[in-house]
Amino acid sequence: LKWFKRSLTPEAFPKMTSENDFEIGTVLRRSSDGDVVQAMHKDTGRSFAMRRIEVCPELGRAQEMLQHLQRSGLKDHAAWLNVHADLCFVHEYAGSDGWHARCCLVEDLADRTLHEDLIERSVGRDFQDLLKEYATLLSGLQSFHAQNCLHRDITGRNIFFSAAQVKLGPPGPTFTTAPADYYAGGVCDAYSADILALGLVFLEMALLRPLSDFTTPDAALRDPKESTVSHDAALRSWIHDEASSHGLVHEDVKDIIVAMLSWPPSARPTADDLLDWPTLAVHVDPQQVLPILERPCVLLSHLPGMPHGDAPRRSGLAMPHLHQLFSREGVEALRSRRYSWCGQEFDLWWLEHDDLSIPDSNVNAYQDELFGFAKHPERDFPVSPRAFLNSARRCRRESHFVAADVLCRAALRCPSSDGEALYQLAEVQMERGNFMAARQCFDRAQHLVQETENVRLLGICEFLAALQAVRNAQGEVSHRGDTESAVAMRTVHMNLYYRSRLAAERGEWEVFLGLGEFYRLVGPDVPRHKAPDEATALSYFRQAHAETEAMSDCRDPPPLSRRFLKDRLARLEWALSHGGEDRDCV
């Protein structure tokens, strides 16, 4: 009996938060489904923002909605506006027409919303500051998507500035429509709908005007289903016209926005894809970004009724542009053998490989030393990038590819950074199997080289240079006959042979790696199907092996166990000795 009495004491029951625990202050903003008020918690004296959302009078439905709004079961991210789940509650009250329920979501009190900032701001953001804010918001959205959750409420009024940091507000509930101004038809049923909404937010940030102030785009933008190419061309032209009088939009920003607003929805990159872009890479923690083969197939993600987390993962490589977008099922579903991506159309030449990446070694020893900088995106490094790049090379030789990725991004933050850091980041991305990001880093580095002319081509980037030559040759002869096309391709391969001879004279073993990888995946004739030249590829890999054997200790040769070379030699020797049958090595 004594135990029973003790169990009935007030301490035995957790206190339930209610509206009586707060002193409700001024209304901060209103919306169609409720309002946001400033509220002081009486016990602690701390001020919060309380989002009050009117819902149906069913208590169970209101509790379900509150669970979703407070991100129950999700791992928090630094780019999310903090929600205090222990203080959130459902408030029931009687009205003239019966009982009502209201979800009360308690959040950190932010300084202002993006919408308010755009109205008050008269001077644009610095270009790098704008990219940093883009990367922060993309990282926040990526965290939602990686946890199989769509956001459904990305708007200028649900993005906040708190202590000079941009924050993404809480997601919208699953059983209500998304804001129609940012989501086509008020529907969010795939990652691309969130990407479209965030792209419109990026457009607002770039043009310093809320969406409601934009002039109406032309017909190609209002009804993009008529023509993919005309939609994206008209979009870029419209952005240029809107910004021309102010000079606000950098070309790199235009590329990001056009990609996010592309049509059809499957042509839009995921948040992970965008975080790979070289213009954003310097502000990104590579540990957060999903490996390329763990990202959803962009085509099958948009099948009606396909849950976000159930879409098949990507499994192959579209050549020669190195896009890694589709699963095998997605390729089979493509009827036209052409696909759209980020505002452009491409022919589909498909390679399916399970051996594009090399396993990463344990990097626990590098956590404290290397990954600290990723937690401080505002931090720059006053030292020379050379120290970071030398450390990255050592990490690569020991197969610590994630650590090498971090170091290359650190080198990009150095004031004296040049194209060489991007070249090496491209190589690391290739070794991690992310050929799509590698190509973008390579193209960006080539652009810098043309401006500075002080960076040499590095190692395995010869693979990317070879593909660039193939693309150029295809573009020059696309309207000519087969004879001229064959001559152009022979010229490409002759130039590659001269590259290999120059590499032999210099003892550049990594160049042979790049050329070997080119012939392993592409082959001599560059057809629309897989036809690699394994014998030529093996010859180049053996030359790379011979160069490493001949290197003296004073030149710091990589160990013969370096995985990329060892892996490719083992694969090709097995394939040639077994009649072309490949196997999974390493």
Image (cartoon, rainbow, N blue to C red):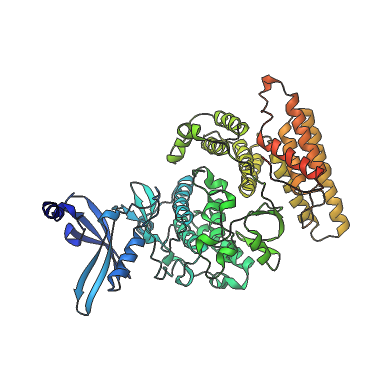
From the viewer's perspective, tell me whether residue 405 is left or right of residue 179.
Answer: right
Looking at the picture, tell me which residue is in the foreground, 70 or 135: 70
State the image coordinates of residue 310 (x, y, percent, origin top left).
53, 61
Height in image: 457 above or below 187? above
Looking at the picture, tell me which residue is in the foreground, 123 or 372: 372
Looking at the picture, tell me which residue is in the foreground, 376 or 405: 405
Most extreme residue toward the front is 1
State the image coordinates of residue 81 (x, y, percent, origin top left).
35, 53
Q: Write the residue at 73% across / 24% down.
A: 551
Residue 267 occupies quadrant: bottom right
Residue 33 occupies quadrant: bottom left
State the image coordinates of residue 515 (x, y, percent, origin top left).
75, 40
State the image coordinates of residue 246 (x, y, percent, origin top left).
48, 55
Most extreme residue toward the right is 483
Assign the C terminus to one quadrant of the image. Answer: top right
From the viewer's perspective, tell me whether residue 447 is left or right of residue 47.
Answer: right
Residue 376 in sight in this render: no
Residue 315 occupies quadrant: bottom right
Looking at the picture, tell me which residue is in the foreground, 91 or 573: 573
